[in-house]
Amino acid sequence: MTDTEADFDLAAVFGVLLQIGSTMERLNRRIDAIEKREKQWAELAPRPLRVRKSGVYPTTSGQTLVLGLPGPRLQRQREYRQLIVGGATWGTSAAGTANVYVSPSNPDVLGEGAEALWAQVDEAASLPSVAFYSSGQMVVNYGFDIYVEIINGTAGQVYAVAGFCWDVPEGLWRPEPTVL
């Protein structure tokens, strides 16, 4: 083998290596773009959530028990599909009624009557109670929480609220058209 043949083979090898390196760079850029897009889609995807809270009804007469379910984080909203209010388990009989509020503050702060009426979205005449909501019927935006106020409960009894909702990006939910 002459020096010229060795140089030619070496140049061919370097050429192939440069092509492989260039191809690898393009592939890495495409993979990075795909990963970035997947992260963006994951952020936009609706997330199913189960929420729950429990508490003991106060022993002081005239008081109510308020169970708060936290609202969504910034730029998200929650569309509730189900709320269950009652005793610690489904089989536990629970005395009292319940009011459901969507509000930026606890209904104890809202007071009675018209002050709390604007925030009330549902009520349960007896416990345990299961409420199902259709699409867009109970949407909770950033800055608001759900509060369930148990009224006329049994002193010292454990009450619970549980629910299912979709956590979606703000503005993704659209109200369904009303047919007249």
Image (cartoon, helix red, strand yellow):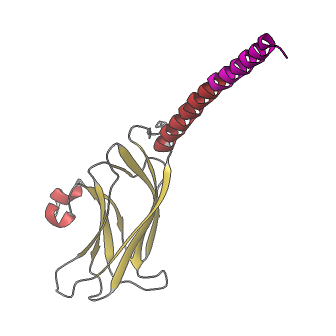
Residue 102 percent across, percent down from the top left: 29, 56
Find residue 162 and report its image quarter. bottom left
Q: In the image, is residue 119 part of the stretch drawn in magenta?
A: no
- Residue extending farthest to the top is 4
Whether residue 73 can be seen here: yes
Residue 41 percent across, percent down from the top left: 51, 39
Please provide the residue range marked out in magenta: 1-22
Find residue 22 and report its image quarter. top right
- Residue extending farthest to the front is 2
- Residue, x 42% and y 86% (percent of image)? 93
Q: Is residue 8 above or below residue 89?
A: above
User: Closer to the camera, 114 or 88?
Assistant: 88
Q: Is residue 122 above or below residue 62?
A: above
Find residue 94 and report its image quarter. bottom left
Would residue 83 appear left or right of 16 to someone viewing this image?
A: left
In this figure, what is the number of numbered marks? 0
Residue 78 percent across, percent down from the top left: 40, 51
- Residue extending farthest to the right is 1
Q: Quadrant of the N terminus?
A: top right
Q: Main secondary structure of the magenta part?
A: helix
Q: Is residue 103 above or below residue 90?
A: above
Would residue 66 appear left or right of 82 to someone viewing this image?
A: left
- Residue, x 46% and y 82% (percent of image)? 89
Residue 79 percent across, percent down from the top left: 43, 51
User: Closer to the camera, 35 or 171?
Assistant: 35
Whether residue 83 can be seen here: no
Q: Is residue 103 above or below residue 46?
A: below
- Residue, x 16% and y 81% (percent of image)? 62
User: Closer to the camera, 26 or 133?
Assistant: 26
Would residue 144 appear left or right of 85 to someone viewing this image?
A: left
